[in-house]
Image: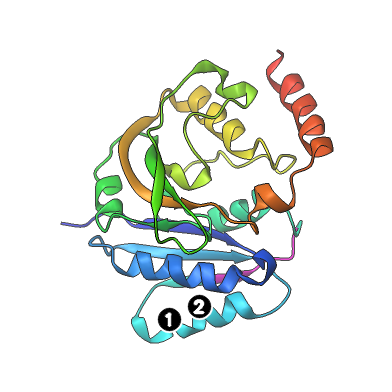
Amino acid sequence: MESNLISICIPCYEMGGKGATRLEQLIRSICYQTYTNYEIIISDHSVKSDIYDVTKSFEFEHLKINYIKNDYKRGSSSANVNSALRSANGSIIKIMFQDDFFIDNNALNIISKKQSSWGVCGCVHSLEDNAVFYNRLIPFWQDNIKKGVNTLGGPSCLFFKKTDVYFDENLLWFMDTDFFYRMYLKFGLPDIIEQPLYSSRESVNSVSRTLITDELIERETKIIKEKYDF
């Protein structure tokens, strides 16, 4: 029997004109889930109405979609994720970035059965056309996660019980590893699902390809070193 409401939190933006298409593909993958006690929280940083139009196109499919037009700190993925998190009603949070999508129809069902405070799942990668999956990532923990050595995956690997831990809005490149480490400090080691539950799309329009510069990484490295004293 389904009991836990899962909030699927999706930060959205234009993605060079492909944001709406990517979001539609993600929502379609959610529709195939065998576990149906979920809500979809969309926080939209885009200027135009494309993302909103996609959410309206699913109006007659009886999905519980909460759309938020978010102008706060436009361009900050961390701020946009936090906007979705603050509007989530579920006892379990599942983060999904809009260019990623579920590849296992039982993904939410698997996550719903976990009792730990937080965890991560494996993934595969795909290109723009998502026709071929490759480079399976099996997440594992190591202490250099606080230094940005990421062996867990992107933010879409995350699921956790609702908490007061949020993403550091001063970070973009290190937003995921910093969040991982602070969850570890509060709750201990993550529950690791080695099975790939989603695909991480390699896209020329992704944040890592369009917004990350050497200067940004250098600035954020200083923030991380000061925060964790190394």
**Which quadrant would residue 5 be assigned to in this image?**
bottom left
Q: CA distance from mark 2 to mark 1?
A: 6 Å
Percent across and percent down for residue 88 are 48, 57
Percent across and percent down for residue 175 are 64, 39
Q: Nearer the viewer, residue 68 or 104?
A: 104
Q: Nearer the viewer, residue 5 or 157?
A: 157
| Residue under the point 42% across and 69% down | 27
| Residue under the point 44% across and 43% down | 157
Residue to which mark 2 is pinned: 55
Task: Report if residue 89 is visible in the image.
Answer: no
Quadrant showing the C terminus: top right
| Residue under the point 55% across and 27% down | 181
Q: Which range is magenta?
A: 67-72
Disc 1 marks a residue whose amino acid type is Phe
Q: Are marks 2 and 1 in contact (CB under 8 Å)?
A: yes
Left/right of residue 110 with respect to residue 117 in the rendered view: left
Task: Report if residue 216 is visible in the image.
Answer: yes
Q: Nearer the viewer, residue 36 or 173?
A: 173
Disc 2 marks a residue whose amino acid type is Thr
Residue ranking furthest to the left? 1
Left/right of residue 218 with respect to residue 51 in the rendered view: right
